[in-house]
Amino acid sequence: MKNFLNNSLIIIFLFITTICIAKEKVLFAVNNNPVTTIDLNQRINYLSLLKNFDINKINKSEYINDLISIKLFDEFVKKKRLNIQEKEIKKYFDVIYQKNQKKIEDLIIDKKLTNEIILKNIRYDLQRKKTIELLLDDRINEIYITSNNQNIIDIYNIEINYLIIAKEYKNEINNFYDKLLKKEIDLIKNYLNNTGIEYEFFSKKIINLDRLNKEIKKIIIENKNSFFIDEKNYILVGIVKKNLKKDIDLKYSFFQIKVKKNINFEIITNEFINCNNIKQKLSDSRLEIKEFKSINIENLNINIFQNFAKENERLIIKNNKQKMLILVCKIDYNKEIAKDKTIENNLIKIADEIEKDFIQKYKNEFNLQLFN
């Protein structure tokens, strides 16, 4: 009897799948419940109410992954008997409807959405949100970062692109390291592919330096743009990309230092000039020194000031055969906004990790089956 029931369920499932294939393609199944391109298109149309994007110019694989995610979270919620209040779902629906009334009405007329489909998708999102929030409690200490590492995390969005290369290729990489790291990461990968050097490539957004390799952390704090790290069993080669954050009221106080006519510029580079002794240098007749106080980053050359991560840093600028030295002595920004942005980014990053771990953990338990 048990075998008969199992075989019957398989036949029923295949029959359902065949019917769906005749109309729409089956993408995957969770606990033997098929999910089709109809579900995907409904999900995409619903998400288009929340975000402004062109449905015809999207990467559907990203939305399939999202659909897999909400379906697995849905099974988890059913199993754990977690409850989402109907009034909460209705509250979100009212907000979405007020902002998108005309678009919703058009989608309903075109039979691409219904109010019931919108409500169902709101439930999916709330279920995932609530579950991730519960799992976040175990990692709450990772969200709040106490050390600011000389403003690096506060003022920059940081990303590292790096390659892990087998130790046997150390000499080849060492010989071409300087040349390689002047190129974009894709050109580096092309070079390695053409020379047959095996590697693994990784790209990470950096929010918390304390979780990094100690050497990479040091390189970022020292405001360097590349690294070559010789580990015991492999080599790490990478590029650090830093972009100044917006909307944190970032301001620089700095000195612009030039030499007067017929004076060798080397007197600037040879003499030790820093923020502690710059006032004394104002009386030096060989120098032209201008002071700039609290200049907003929007009014500065971002390509130049992108290079300053901390106070007392200096940079020589060459412009139309003229040289000058920029000495930054103070970096101001709204620390509360910067802190909130860092916490928000960290929260998003950890929530994303939790979601990926959740999918990895429960895809087998809830019998996720992918179809080509």
Image: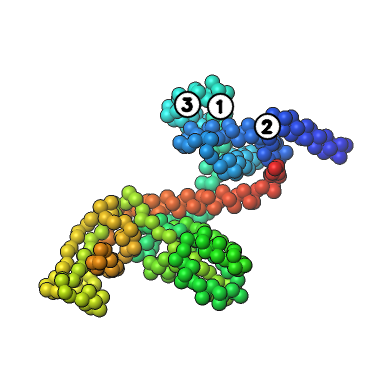
Which mark, by number, is residue 113?
1
Q: Is residue 362 left or right of residue 266?
A: right
Q: Are marks 3 and 1 in contact (CB under 8 Å)?
A: no
Q: Residue 48, relative to residue 188: is it above or below?
A: above
Q: Are marks 2 and 1 in contact (CB under 8 Å)?
A: no
**In-front residue for pair 187/18:** 187
**Considering the image in quadrants, where does the C terminus appear?**
top right
Question: Picture quarter containing residue 191?
Answer: bottom right
Q: Would you say residue 123 is visible in this rendering?
A: no
Give the CA distance from mark 3 to mark 1.
10 Å
**Considering the image in quadrants, where does the N terminus appear?**
top right
Residue, x 23% and y 61% (percent of image)?
253
Give the CA distance from mark 2 to mark 1.
16 Å
* Residue indicated by mark 2: 24
Q: Residue 164, relative to residue 127: is it above or below?
A: below
Q: How many neighbours does mark 1 have within 10 angstroms: few (below 14), some (14-19), or many (20 or more)? A: some
**In-front residue for pair 361/59:** 59
For the residue labelled by badge 1, is the local secondary structure a helix, a strand or a loop? loop
Q: How many neighbours does mark 3 have within 10 angstroms: few (below 14), some (14-19), or many (20 or more)? A: few
In the rendered structure, which disc, 2 or 1, sits on the residue that comes first in sequence? Answer: 2
Q: Position of residue 125 (x, y in %)?
A: 54, 38
Q: Position of residue 189 (x, y in %)?
A: 55, 62
In the rendered structure, which disc, 3 or 1, sits on the residue that comes first in sequence? Answer: 3
